[in-house]
Amino acid sequence: KAPAPPHTHRRAMAVAEGAASAGAPVWEPLKAEGNALFKAGEFLKAAAIYTKALKAAGKDAAKMEALAPVYSNRSAAFLKVNKLKQALADAKTCCELRPDWEKGWYRAGMAHEALAALGGDGAAVERAGAEKAYNKASELAPQSAELAQKSKPKRRSNKPGRAATASQGGSFSFPDAVPREAPKGERAWSTDELGRGDAAWLAATRAPSQLKGEDIGQAPEFVAAIFKAGEAVNAMGMWLGKYLALAQKQRPGKEVWFYEAPGLVALLDQGLWQALLDALGHVVMVIIGAEAQKGSNIAAAAAEAGAALAQACAGVMHNLLGPSLRAWSARQEHTQLLAAFAKVCATEGTFLTLPPGSDLAQSPEMAKFLMCAGQLLGDAEAYAALTGHAVLTRIRLNLLRAQTTAMRASSDEDKKKWKNEAESNARMLVLLLRVREAGKWEQVAEVLCDKDKAKTFHGEVAACVVQHELLAGAWPKFGYSGSVGL
């Protein structure tokens, strides 16, 4: 995990010291520090500091009315990092301490709503809990338009292409247009009981990018294609929700996990990630094109549908990364293999590290790289792990983390460092995707030792960097700022 920028900690400590100097309770400086970290997007650290504040208050913290804001704030932090049950527990404590404060009821509604989005047998109960909490909050703060909207009875919408709305808590989000099937038990995890998805979803998701952006204003088929793509992504989100519901119940470290479930692997092998990344990139161009054609109703409709499709794509990709954040640490063999492969890929003087177009003569460095990579990928178990979707997804996560950190960096030196880290992960990702497709390392290595063919590889890497950077920049706009666990 990348450290928070130094200025974040300085700001937090300054706030904390200011509170302490004013003769505040012993826990007040910690609360102020947690608030500063939360505002900086450091949600896990904020939750930890809020916990320290509550411990500093003593064993009777859960009975102290003055601590209600701390429980409320920790609930918000937990919600941001998908710790939904903890978020609900803190919200309930807040409501018990200050039953006349609308903020606690609002937090409870958010937590219930996020839990309902996971589906399963308890979804109806959670939805009822959310409605009750929002209604109570609205009663206490009738002037709040947001609470008034939340407390209104919700009607399910079947409008074509309507994207899933991301919860403000950054939790897993699924479209709510079609009733979800409950998971069929643990056996469904390692079989095809949950289905293998529908290839037509991917075809519909890819379709809009086959139309030319400059013709938006004169092409009604743009709007139809984008709406249909939105429906397809929503359908994938619904189907993926069944796997994620099981992922939440799985104990990390079990033999079969999310990225090894046959049904999910089948859709990932058909190019799920690339289809979503392509769609996201295309709708950005659609929106830009629509801006240049103001006054066209078709262009305006395409832009609106494109924004909904972009949000749906970002939500599904957010959900695909979730289990890696939760369970990766339990897979030590995957961690060690990926670290070893990253070290091999960092070898100087190879097609991975030399600039595109460089002469790839058989140098000692190249020979060493080919030998070490061949040893790793020549072992059947190591090959299966390194080219498996668990490792591929983790590399995507590391790539997105590096890009997110680069965006937040305050110095040119740090920006350059993290951009280089992102490019290194992109090279590994493209390389391993090629190896998975080819079925063996030697076939890929032979192609990439050719100078001209290596240029194509570097072109794929550059496109990979751009597409993931677009996703990293889009997530905060749709309420997924915690997607990469930073």
Image (tube, rainbow, N blue to C red):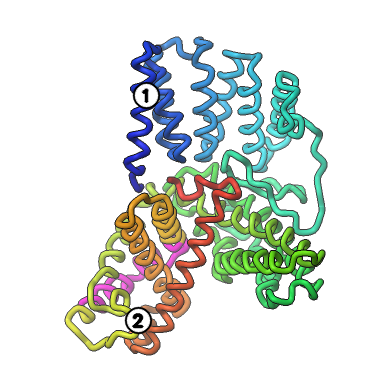
Q: Quadrant of the C terminus?
A: top left
Answer few, some or many: residues within 10 Å of disc 2's Cα (few below 14, many 20 plus, some between 14 and 19): some
Is residue 79 rendered to the left or right of residue 404?
A: right
Q: Is residue 210 positioned above or below 451 on the image?
A: above
Q: Is residue 239 magenta?
A: no
Q: CA distance from mark 1 to mark 2?
A: 50 Å
Residue 195: give x, y in percent of width and height.
Answer: 66, 60
**SS state under label 1:** helix
User: What are the residue bounds of the magenta stretch?
Assistant: 368-392
Tag count = 2
Q: Position of residue 411 (x, y in %)?
A: 33, 52
Name which residue type carries label 1: Ala
Main SS, magenta region, reads helix
Residue 36 sits in quarter = top left
- In magenta stretch: residue 387: yes
Residue marked by disc 2: 356
Q: Nearest the camera: 382 or 111? A: 111
Residue under the image location 24 percent in, 73 percent down:
372
Q: Nearer the viewer, residue 366 or 125?
A: 366
Residue for badge 1: 16
